[in-house]
Image (cartoon, rainbow, N blue to C red):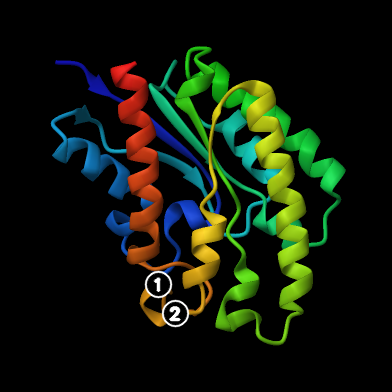
Amino acid sequence: MKTYSYLALGDSYTIGEQVNLLQSFPYQTVQLLRAAGLNFYAPEIIASTGWTTEELKLAIDESLLQAEYDFISVLIGVNNQYQGRSVDEFRVHFRVILELAIQQAGGVAKNVIVLSIPDWGVTPFAINKSPEKVRSEIDMYNFICQAEAEHFQTRFIDITQSQRLDGNREAFLAPDLLHPSQKEYAKWAEQIAALVMVSLNG
């Protein structure tokens, strides 16, 4: 039986800031797929807290990646928004990242899964940081994420709407009251695993 590979590209949300690495959504995704009887290597992760699209692109360029991956997830952009970077710049960088991801997925766009950017404005951390402004800007960035995913014919998962409902509940938050907990990441992992299963069964 084939053993599948999974590369996760992103920022603090991808590494699972303030939770155990095994509780991050890439690792939870692989655990779900293994439980379904599929053979998966441990996920490879190119991500770091604070990264913008520019830093992720540079890291991809500089990383010693294997020739191809069966599945790739992309979740990036919150730090562009946090730093007040231009949405036009984000779109340009995001397109390049998607092109690189599709290339690393052997040209199979449907095996690249884009996740929407969580809205940190709903968390207790943002109580004095203009949450409505954050919401509006996150929506703008996510519009680009979805539009580019459709343009490149990758998969797209909107995790933001559900995250907004739970983003101020302690059970769904890490100790910093900003990043998600294992419980929130589990919801993302379930959706990614479901799309992987669709691809493998298609």
**What type is the residue that disc 1 sits on?**
Phe
Residue 193, placed above or below residue 82? above
Task: Return the residue nearer the eye: 3 or 51.
Answer: 3
Mark 1 sits on what residue? Answer: 172
Task: Return the residue nearer the eye: 67 or 195.
Answer: 195
Find numbered disc 1 in the image and state the secondary structure of the residue it sits on. helix
Residue 157, placed above or below residue 69? below
- Quadrant containing the C terminus is top left
Task: Return the residue nearer the eye: 93 or 61.
Answer: 93
Q: Position of residue 40 (x, y in %)?
A: 23, 30
Toward the top, the furthest residue is: 107
Toward the bottom, the furthest residue is: 128
**On the image, which quarter does residue 71 sit in?**
top left
Residue drawn at point x = 35 percent, y = 30 percent? 196
**On the image, which quarter does residue 173 sit in?**
bottom left
Report if the CB atoms under discs 1 and 2 are less than 8 Å apart.
Answer: yes
Q: Is residue 130 visible?
A: yes
Q: Position of residue 97 (x, y in %)?
A: 65, 31
**On the image, which quarter does residue 115 sit in?**
top right
User: How packed is label 2: few (under 14 Cα within 10 Å), some, or many (20 or more)?
Assistant: some
Residue 169 numbered tag:
2
